[in-house]
C-alpha cells in the first residue's frame, strides 16, 4: 500500500502542471492539455499568471521559514506555534512542512511549459510575447535560486513534465552548476526579453526585478563587480512617473509604504500602469482576497500580532542593536517594533494594533526585493572591491533617513569591519523581509552568529532537511548529511 501511495504521490508531483489559481482573474487552465492550451495571447497570459500564483503559494509561509525564522532576528512566539519554534530553535526534522519542495517544483514545471510553448504563440505584439517569455525565464531562475539556498543541491528540470515517465526520478544536481548554467543564463535571457517600455508592474517581474535577482545571484558567486554594475542599471529605467525604482528619503513615507502601499492593491491587468506611489519596491508577492480565496490570506498580521497566535517575536539579539551607541535614536525602531503582550512584536507592516478579525483577510504583500536592499548589496559589493568610501556613501543614504550618523572609511581598520557594519545595517533595515538568514549563509557568518543563539555549529546545518516523502518517492535523492538518512 505504501509503495502505491508514494508512486501516486510522485506522479502527482510530476503531473501537477496547471493547477491554476484565480490569479489576476484569468479562467482556469488546469483541465486543458498543455499542447492545446498554449495557443493564444490569452493562454500565454493565463499560463504566466499561474507561475505567479504558484510562487505565492510557495512563499506564503516559506517567505518567513526560509528567509527569516532561522536567523537571529526572531525568537519563538506563542507556545501553540510549535512548527515555527522548531525552525527558530534549530530542532528541525525531516517531516517539517517547510522542508517540502512540491509547490516550488510545480512552479518550475509551469515555467518550463511557458518557456517551451510561448515562442510558438502568434501574438499581435511580439514585444508582449517576449515579455511573457522573459518573465518565465526570470521566475524559473528565482525558483531555483530559492531551491539552492534552502537545500543546496536539488534535482534539475529544464524541460516540462507533461506525462509520467522514469525521467521524473532525478538525482540532485550541484548547486553551483545550477547557479552558473541555469540561474544566471536564465536571467540573461530574461534581460534581453523583458519589455522595458511597457512592463512597469511591481507585482510581476519587470526589468528591474530581473536585475535584482541577478545582482543577488552575483553576490552569491562573489562576482562583486558584476553585482555593482547590475544594480547601477536600475537608475536608467523610467516610466511616465520618472525613475521606476528609486530610494525613498522620507522615514514617514518609508513607514506608510509598508503599512499602506503594500495593502489591498488591485489585480495586475494593466502592467503599463504602476499603482504604487512609492518607487522603493521592485518585486512583491501580491495578495488579494478575490484571487487567493478564504484560505490564501497573507500571514503578515496573524503570524506577528497577538500573544495567542503569533509565530515569532523579535529577538533580544536584534533589539540589542538599537542600544548600541551609534544606533540610539534610530527612527526605524518605533515603526518596526512594539513591546506588546510580553513580546517585541514586528510592527513594520501594521499601522496599529491588529484585531484578530483582520488576520484572515490580510492582503499585505511580501516584498521580495526593494531598492534599499539593492543599495546595501551594492555597498557590500563596493566594500569588497576596496571602495570603502563609496560603500559608506550608499549606507549614509539609508542611515540619514533613519536619523543616524555614518562614519567615514577612516573609522574602519579592515574590510571585515566594513562588511559587518553593512550587514548590521541590512539586518535592521530589512528585518521581516525574508533576507537575514540568506545574508548569513551567503557571507559564511551563520555559525559565528547563530551558535550562541541556538547552537548551530556543524557543517551542513545551514541547509534545510529534504522532506522524507521526497526521498521515499525518489530513491535517487539523498538526504542532507546533517539530518541523517531519514
Image: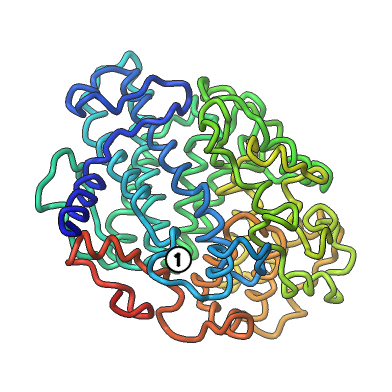
**Residue 143: x and y, percent?**
39, 50
**Residue 424: x and y, percent?**
69, 70
Q: Is residue 339 above or below residue 129?
A: below
Classify residue 220 by image quadrant.
bottom left
- The single residue placed furthest to the left in the displayed view is 166
Number of residues whose C-alpha sits closer than 10 Å to that of mark 1, classed few (under 14), some (14–19) or many (20 or more)? some
Residue 339 falls left or right of residue 123? right
Q: Is residue 148 above or below residue 50?
A: below
- Whether residue 390 can be seen here: no
Residue 431 falls left or right of residue 294? right
Classify residue 39 by image quadrant.
top left
Q: Nearer the viewer, residue 292 or 111?
A: 292
Q: Nearer the viewer, residue 167 or 385?
A: 167
Question: Which residue position holds label 1?
Answer: 220
Q: Is residue 26 above or below residue 434?
A: above
Residue 304 falls left or right of residue 85? right
**Residue 359: x and y, percent?**
67, 41
Residue 232 falls left or right of residue 348? left
Residue, x 46% and y 75% (percent of image)? 462
- Number of residue marks: 1
Classify residue 245 by image quadrant.
top right
Which image quadrant: the C terminus? Answer: bottom left
Q: Nearer the viewer, residue 362 or 206?
A: 362
Amino acid at each position: 500500500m505504501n509503495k502505491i501511495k508514494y508512486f501516486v504521490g510522485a506522479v502527482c508531483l510530476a503531473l501537477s502542471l496547471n493547477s491554476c489559481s484565480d490569479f489576476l482573474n484569468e479562467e482556469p487552465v488546469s483541465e486543458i492539455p498543455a499542447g492545446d492550451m498554449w495557443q493564444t495571447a490569452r493562454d500565454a497570459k493565463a499560463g504566466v499568471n499561474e507561475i505567479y500564483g504558484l510562487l505565492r503559494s510557495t512563499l506564503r509561509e516559506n517567505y518567513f521559514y526560509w528567509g527569516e525564522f532561522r536567523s537571529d532576528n526572531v525568537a519563538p512566539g506563542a507556545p501553540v506555534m510549535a512548527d515555527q519554534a522548531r525552525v527558530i530553535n534549530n530542532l528541525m526534522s525531516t517531516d517539517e512542512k517547510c522542508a517540502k519542495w512540491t509547490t516550488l517544483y510545480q512552479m518550475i514545471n509551469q515555467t518550463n511549459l511557458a518557456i517551451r510553448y510561448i515562442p510558438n504563440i502568434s501574438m499581435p505584439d511580439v514585444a508582449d510575447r517576449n515579455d511573457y517569455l522573459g518573465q518565465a525565464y526570470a521566475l524559473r531562475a528565482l525558483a531555483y535560486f530559492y531551491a539552492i539556498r534552502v537545500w543546496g543541491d536539488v534535482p534539475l528540470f529544464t524541460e516540462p513534465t507533461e506525462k509520467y515517465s522514469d525521467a521524473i526520478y532525478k538525482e540532485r544536481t550541484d548547486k553551483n552548476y545550477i547557479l552558473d548554467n541555469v540561474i544566471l543564463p536564465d536571467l540573461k535571457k530574461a534581460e534581453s526579453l523583458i519589455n522595458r517600455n511597457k512592463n512597469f508592474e511591481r507585482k510581476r517581474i519587470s526589468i528591474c526585478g530581473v536585475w535584482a535577482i541577478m545582482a543577488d545571484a552575483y553576490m552569491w558567486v562573489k562576482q562583486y563587480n558584476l553585482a555593482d554594475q547590475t544594480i547601477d542599471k536600475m537608475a536608467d529605467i523610467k516610466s511616465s512617473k520618472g525613475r521606476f525604482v528609486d530610494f525613498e528619503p522620507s522615514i514617514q513615507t518609508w513607514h506608510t509604504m509598508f503599512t499602506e502601499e503594500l495593502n489591498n492593491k488591485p489585480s495586475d491587468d494593466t502592467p503599463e500602469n504602476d499603482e504604487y506611489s512609492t518607487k522603493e519596491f521592485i518585486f512583491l508577492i501580491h495578495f488579494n482576497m478575490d484571487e487567493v480565496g478564504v484560505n490564501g490570506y497573507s500571514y503578515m498580521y496573524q503570524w506577528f500580532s497577538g500573544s495567542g497566535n503569533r509565530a515569532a517575536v523579535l529577538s533580544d539579539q536584534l533589539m540589542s542593536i538599537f542600544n548600541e551607541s551609534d544606533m540610539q535614536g534610530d527612527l526605524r525602531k518605533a515603526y518596526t517594533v512594539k513591546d506588546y503582550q510580553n513580546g517585541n512584536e514586528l510592527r513594520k507592516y501594521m499601522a496599529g494594533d491588529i484585531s484578530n478579525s483582520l488576520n484572515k483577510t490580510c492582503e499585505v504583500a511580501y516584498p521580495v526585493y526593494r531598492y534599499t536592499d539593492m543599495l546595501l548589496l551594492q555597498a557590500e559589493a563596493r566594500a569588497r572591491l576596496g571602495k570603502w568610501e563609496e560603500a559608506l556613501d550608499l549606507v549614509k543614504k539609508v542611515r540619514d533617513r533613519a536619523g543616524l550618523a555614518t562614519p567615514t572609511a577612516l573609522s574602519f581598520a579592515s574590510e571585515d569591519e566594513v562588511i559587518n557594519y553593512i550587514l548590521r545595517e541590512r539586518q535592521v533595515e530589512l528585518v521581516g523581509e525574508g533576507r537575514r538568514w540568506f545574508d548569513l549563509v551567503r557571507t559564511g557568518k551563520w555559525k559565528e552568529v547563530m551558535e550562541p543563539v541556538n547552537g548551530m555549529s556543524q557543517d551542513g546545518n545551514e541547509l534545510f532537511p529534504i522532506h522524507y516523502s521526497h526521498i521515499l518517492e525518489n530513491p535517487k535523492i539523498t538526504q542532507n548529511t546533517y539530518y541523517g538518512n531519514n
